[in-house]
Image (cartoon, rainbow, N blue to C red):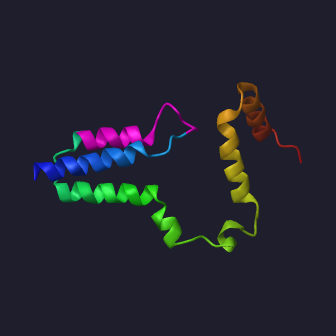
Amino acid sequence: MARQAISAQRHILRALSQWPKDTLRPHVQFQDVLRKRFETSSSLPEQDQLKEANALYSLLDNRYKKKYPITGSLLRPKSKPTYFTDLVKELEEAPNRSYLERMMLRLKGVVRLQ
């Protein structure tokens, strides 16, 4: 029993070590929060720990994205067809912006000329 519990904890820690880093908030990482949670709740039964490890691995492998693919009609709403591509572009550019660029974008959002 103790060996399975160690194995389950090892699976959880391995899955958390493979979790991607958050570039938008580098000082708060999701895997660090989960690691603290799993360290404090190590009294769970090994079956529950294995289920949690399986859930982490399924999220890492994009199992649900592969099982339920999103079609083009959902990604292109009629009100603004480029919304999701603009959102992805914005999220990729955000970590590399300087302070001045962030302030300019904030001012652009406040002042709208139409």
Residue 41, image x and y in percent? 22, 44
Residue stretch in magenta: 23-39
Give x and y (percent) for residue 85. Answer: 72, 57
Q: Position of residue 8 (x, y in %)?
A: 24, 51
What residue is at 40 percent from the left and 42 percent from the top? 17
Which residue is farthest top?
A: 99
Q: Nearer the viewer, residue 97 or 77?
A: 97
Q: Is residue 32 magenta?
A: yes
Left or right: 21, with 58 as reference point: right
Q: Is residue 49 above or below residue 64?
A: above
State the image quarter where residue 23 is shown: top right
Q: Residue at x 37, y 39 (%)?
A: 33
Q: Is residue 1 visible?
A: yes
Q: Position of residue 13 (x, y in %)?
A: 32, 44
**For residue 34: magenta?**
yes
Decide if residue 32 is on the left or right side of residue 103. left
